Amino acid sequence: MPTISLHNVFDEMVLLLLIAAIAGVAALRLKQPPIIGFIAVGILIGPSALNLIRSVDQVHVLAEMGLALLLFIVGLKLDIGMMRSMGAVSLAIGLGQVILTTIGGFLLSYTLGMNVVTSLYVAVALTFSSTIIIVKLLSDKNETDSLHGRIAIGLLIVQDIVVVLVMVFLSAFSASKSQQPVYQALLIGLKGTGLIAAAWGLSVFIIPRLLSTVARSSEMLVLSGIVWALVLAAAGELLGFSKEIGAFVAGVSLASTSYREALSLKLASLRDFLLLFFFIELGSRLDLGALGSQVWASIPLSLYVLIGNPLIMIAITGVMGYRKRTSLLAGLTVGQVSEFSLILIAMGAKFGQIGNDAVGVVTLVALVTIGLSTYMIKYSQSIYERAHPYLGIFERRKPYREDSRKIAPDGQEPAGTMIFGLGSYGTSIAEQFEDRGRRVVGVDFDPEAIRRWNERGKQAVFGDAKDAELPNALHLSHIRWVISSVRDRDVNTSLLKGLRQAGYNGLVAVAAYDRSEETSLRADGADLIFNPFEDAAVEAADLVFTTEEEIARRAMDKLIESMADHYIICGYGRMGQQIVKDLTRYNVPCVVVEWNPEQLPKLREQNIPHIEGKASEDPMLVKAGIKRAKGLIAVAPSDEENVFIVLTAKVLNPNLFIVARSILTENEDKLKHAGADMVMSPYVLGGRRMAAAVIRPEVMDFLDLVVHSDGIDVEMAKITVPPGASSVGKILRDVKLWEMCGATLLAIRRKDEDLHANPSPDFRIMDLDELIVMGKPEQIEAARKLLSSTEA
């Protein structure tokens, strides 16, 4: 190929970075990781293509520094506390995946004609997944704290530890080929122990004091971290290990310090910049002339990584007791090879144990799998929705590790509000609801968030809002509000769709980044949308309660509009409350008209049909359905108000039966002249009752027991005999009221006659007679039907 000659190293590096930047942008536009673009740059400028770069040694040095920083940052994140938190599950899944994938990869590579050593290298390389790509894509989808995200990250931690151990083994044994195996093992152990002991001693006794001094300057902190990483990288190489192993030990030695987060954050950009040169160098090693043979070998290996590796992962997690959705989403994350795979295969070529053709095959597999797995992770939910009918074989009958997702009865009053997303915003909303007397149950896909809630005595269950099957497993019958604090439109859309499919009829509130999402979310079924940046938790809770009141008000207005032959209660003081209680007990429909702000909360809490306003105003009584009403009871706080109410009511409905309360005896005539059919004075009634309680206490006790007691199922009622009924003209003996219905006849009232108490069996019934009977509700209803029947 023709070559392009540049003047100096600086010009070459400028050209290299320019081409890399263009390739990285192109990869991003194609929705691919920049790594693919960087490897393509290496192919383009390498000896097999344009052969642009002469500064090979400089590129190599920068690449090695990038690898050293990569391993240094990996070590920074491997503190003892985090390794303990991984637990046996992550360790079992990680080791199981590494072992099974290695076995399958070895058999496939050997079948493709590779020798044993090359097959083993390729198999191990295919085992590891890309930490950078997986964490990046999970972060973009806000799934790093999800259950499948945690499983994937736990697996990556195990893989990182395994690959470091493999690199230690390879570098140490490759440096001592002439030694006996036993002597090699002892030498490796001694060297490794010495390196770790030296690093530990420095990190305990010297580095903390040094870091506390240099941390005053961010520049010195970064420089100190880089120097420490490169010093131990050089020490590792001197001891017969690789530079990467030394850098990894340097990172682990600082992992328990308070500066590890600051160092990893500040060095991440420099690491990514220097790794650019590693991927470029890797691409430049591809021999385009031998590409044909490498392509044919890379196809089955790529399919193994894209399909076989996720299936192995799905099977392992299924056996471990996870649901098929969690298993699939975690499995799809491992469908690519890692940057460590490329490092490992490059080490094998450097040590002369494998040829460049194996490096080319694994590099091609990396290009294919990284490119395709990006889409697999991005569209994992869509893949699950299509594949879930066929994944039953990977799920145990009882996926016990996710049984906590079901809400079990706890002996307490069921929660009325369910909140998805237990972050700071969702937790604050929950606290607002609890402060206002509402019980809340939380749902989150982060097991740690659930654990924190349960430790605080709150009820929380595991669940992913994007799981369409989740609402079917939740107990939604008592849930009045479902609230999503997750600021992701796709998540909220999936949740709304799942709730509809599960038949949920309550109210739903969701969070949204901006107002432009409102239309689509409302079309999907959201009743309320709030913006977390504008609506703090208090305001969000206020919006929920206000919306709830508005919806309840509309439903109540609709109920009132449908009422007929009901009673209107004007005033909800102590007397009005007792009237409503008694009418409700006898299933008599009623509507309260009240304007006192102290009484309105009681009406809302008890869900009593009511109109907010003054009963003396025409619009309020019309809204209460006065033209369809059967009667009105005026118990306003003053006689003057009751007079105005009666006058207004009679004008609106002259046929209305009106009962009014008179506080002062002298106002009784005014109320009757205004149109009241019956006027009652609580003081007069109270006085008569008290006198009767003294004179005839046993009678009053009996009447109280029958008329007012809630504990006895006996009542008194008036039954009017309609004209044309078959009972008209019959004597009581022939009607057989007791024999047929079990009701006791107390008296009969006939127009223009005195009350007929305890009538004889020969008393003849006439139309419009009013029979006063006593009995159980069903007995009285049976007597009403018997006396009203037109059948002979």
Image (cartoon, grey):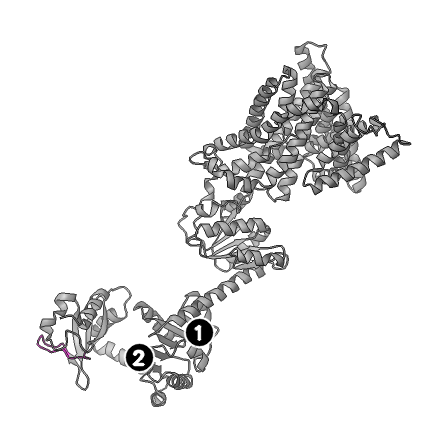
Q: What main secondary structure does the magenta stretch of the protein show?
A: loop
Give yes or no for contact between labels 2 and 1 (Cβ–Cβ under 8 Å): no
The answer to whether 619 is drawn above or below residue 601 in the figure is below
Which residue occupies the extreme right position in the image? 7
Q: Residues within 10 Å of mark 2 (few under 14, many from 20)?
A: few
Amino acid type of the residue tagged 2 in the rendering: Gly
Q: Quadrant of the N terminus?
A: top right
Q: Position of residue 458 (x, y in %)?
A: 49, 49
The residue at which mark 2 appears reads as 686
Q: Residues within 10 Å of mark 1 (few under 14, many from 20)?
A: many
Horizontal side of 416 relative to 107 (left or right) equals left
Amino acid type of the residue tagged 1 in the rendering: Ile
Residue 206, by quadrant, is: top right
Instruction: Measure the C-alpha gap from mark 2 to mark 1.
Output: 30 Å
Horizontal side of 746 relative to 56 (left or right) equals left
The answer to whether 253 is drawn above or below residue 445 in the figure is above
The residue at which mark 1 appears reads as 611
Asked if residue 758 lies in the magenta stretch, the reply is: yes
Q: Position of residue 196 (x, y in %)?
A: 70, 24
Q: Can residue 408 be spotted in the picture? A: yes
Earlier in the chain: of badge 2 and badge 1, it is: 1
Q: Can residue 422 be spotted in the picture? A: no
